[in-house]
Amino acid sequence: LRTKGVLLVFILTVFSFVSLTSMTSCKGDTVTRTINATTTLTETFTTTLPGETITVTTEPVENATRTITDMFGREVIVPSTVNKVLACGPVEMELIYMLAPEKLAGLNFAFNGKPALVAEEYISLPLIGGWFGTQTGNYETFIATGPDIIIDGSEVDIEDRQSKFGEIPVVGVDTGDLMFDYSKAARFLGDLLGVEDKANALIAYYESAMQYVDNIISSIPASERVRVYYAEGKEGFNTDPIGSQHTILLEFCGGINVADVTLLPGYGMAEASMEQILLWDPDMIIIGRGSQASLYQTITNDLRWAGLRAVQEGKVFLRPDNPFSWFDGPPGPCQILGMYWMVNLLYPDQTRDLDLNSKIGEFYSDFLHYDLSTSEIDKLLSNPS
């Protein structure tokens, strides 16, 4: 070490996955640095010695990477620290938003709600589209956003995506059977994005909700379960049957789906006639994808629907969907909160112990990053006036 004002420049070349430790000792003072990297690293710094002062400047490690195995079994080299991420579809996008919204670089679909219940720092996230339902994304738009990685939930298409995204790593995240596999996907993303604590908190909320629903439903005989028609589309004559990904929440929460229609893949929304709906005569109608407010007015005021028990007894409800749907449109991880809402909607007497407003407020604060007011909770749960 030289005299006052001397600048020490160290050029450190670190080869793949080599750990380098640098130690400087001066009169008992020791500085230790450990660097893990896969590319050349340059650091310029100085130190302080008795009788001389040298300014310290340390450049961050850049381009450090690690090799992971994604949820489809593919080995992928990703940045050690991911700061900017995109998703190809809405389920994965919602999970990223819940766990690390500051890392999400764009939306597959726009936030719902006027106004959307979204914190100011996220409301301006760009809409970039994606590959889901009837939507086809644009590769150039994704690449221009400059993500560190791209998350894809389709094992069938992932290699084709990787070839088109070039050097941007595409990581497979398997959400499996949607409602029943969120723990695995959240845990994987928590590690990938460096937010393990947030992922564990979401998993704990999720598993508690599933257990609560199971405890309620297990005590209700099949003969006493609520029969439901799920109304979709502009006129309410579209729906999805038992076994559809679009109605899985209804069935998990103990509702009997009355729709006897063809199970359509992907986007779903099979057609039903007014005559069929009258024959099914459900106890309750839940309105989903489509023009919700206008469809509610149609179902509750149009004479064609007036003969239904659900209409006569005022059992017509909209699914909450701000900023994301709690039940379908698309099905996604807000179904975790939707479990509490759905089981309470179907079985209010059996869920008298449930503080639904508290569960809603907790979920929005912790995972949707927005503190709801009492009036906002009331609006989420209300039908159009």
Image: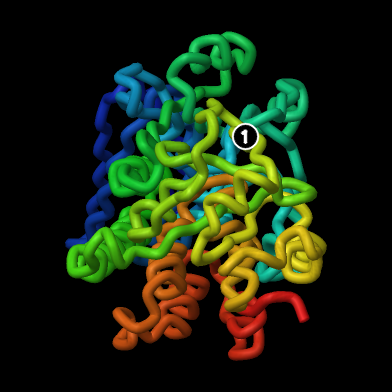
Query: In what element is the residue under mark 1?
Result: strand
| Mark 1 residue type | Ala
How many labels, in total?
Answer: 1
Quarter occupied by residue 336 = bottom left
Q: Which residue is mark 1?
A: 270
Mark 1: give few (<14), some (14-19) or many (20+) Cα within 10 Å.
some
Q: Quadrant of the C terminus?
A: bottom right
Q: By what rule are the colours in the image chosen?
A: rainbow
Q: Residue at x 66, y 65 (%)?
A: 307
Q: Nearer the viewer, residue 326 or 313?
A: 313
Q: Give percent across and percent down for residue 14.
A: 36, 24
Which quadrant is home to the N terminus? top left
- Residue 307 in view, yes or no: yes
- Residue 204 in view (yes/no): no
- Measuring from the top left, give residue 123's x and y in whole percent: 73, 61
Q: Compare residues 162 and 23 and report the one nearer the observer.
A: 162
Q: Picture coordinates of residue 277 (x, y %)? A: 61, 50
